[in-house]
Image: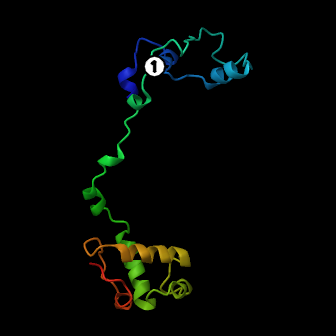
Amino acid sequence: TIRRHWDPSKSPSANLASMGLTANANNLASAKTGFSHKGMAGEGMGAATVEPRTAPKVDVVELYDIPKSDDLSAKNQQNRVTLSLSDQKYIAKCMSKHGDNYTAMFRDIKVNRMQHTEHKLRKLGSRFLLLSEKQRAVSLPDKVKQSAPEST
């Protein structure tokens, strides 16, 4: 992490330069293009100039704690619920009246009181049907049980 490589006796720009970073991105751009930003704050006021090429390089991976995707265990993925309890109740109520007819759900303003679009209702419905019995807090409506695929 940055904290481990930070030296409190150095200036912030010197610390950043020792890690291979720059404190002022404008200086880097002017070095490439030849354009100078004279009269800007910080220049000519005793600003420390450290060449990043001569500073020891620190591996970028060492600066940030990046979790490895392989560490995501299947156990954590199983406990994750993709649909909140209120959304489950909402879509179950819509499905109990209209089954899997999302166009009818969309047009029914009494049941679809949040006025979700047909696409949003379709997404909620598919997520609700993909939930396992353990994840599902609301029972599957009878109109949907007939058309729902059997899970093994």
Q: Is residue 5 above or below residue 141?
A: above
Q: Position of residue 65 (x, y in %)?
A: 37, 36
91 w.r.t. 79: above or below: below
State the residue position of label 1: 57
Image-based side of 27 in relation to 133, left or right: right
Name the one closer to the observer, 37 or 35.
35
Q: How is the image coloured?
A: rainbow
Q: Please determine whether, in this image, residue 99 is positioned above or below residue 75.
A: below
Q: Residue at x 59, y 11 (%)?
A: 47
Vertical comparison of 20 with 103: above or below? above
Q: Quadrant of residue 49?
A: top right
Q: Along the line of sight, which residue is nearer the eye, 152 or 48? A: 152
Residue occupying image coordinates x 54% and y 83%: 106
Q: Is residue 133 left or right of residue 98?
A: left
SS at badge 1 = loop
The quarter of the rendered structure image containing the C terminus is bottom left
Q: Nearer the viewer, residue 20 or 1?
A: 20
Q: As shown in the figure, which amino acid type bears the numbered disc 1?
A: Lys
The quarter of the picture where residue 6 lies is top left
Residue 102 image position (x, y, % from top left): 51, 84
Question: Residue at image x 34%, y 88%?
Answer: 145
In x, y percent, where is residue 109? 54, 85
Which of the image's four quarters has the N terminus? Answer: top left
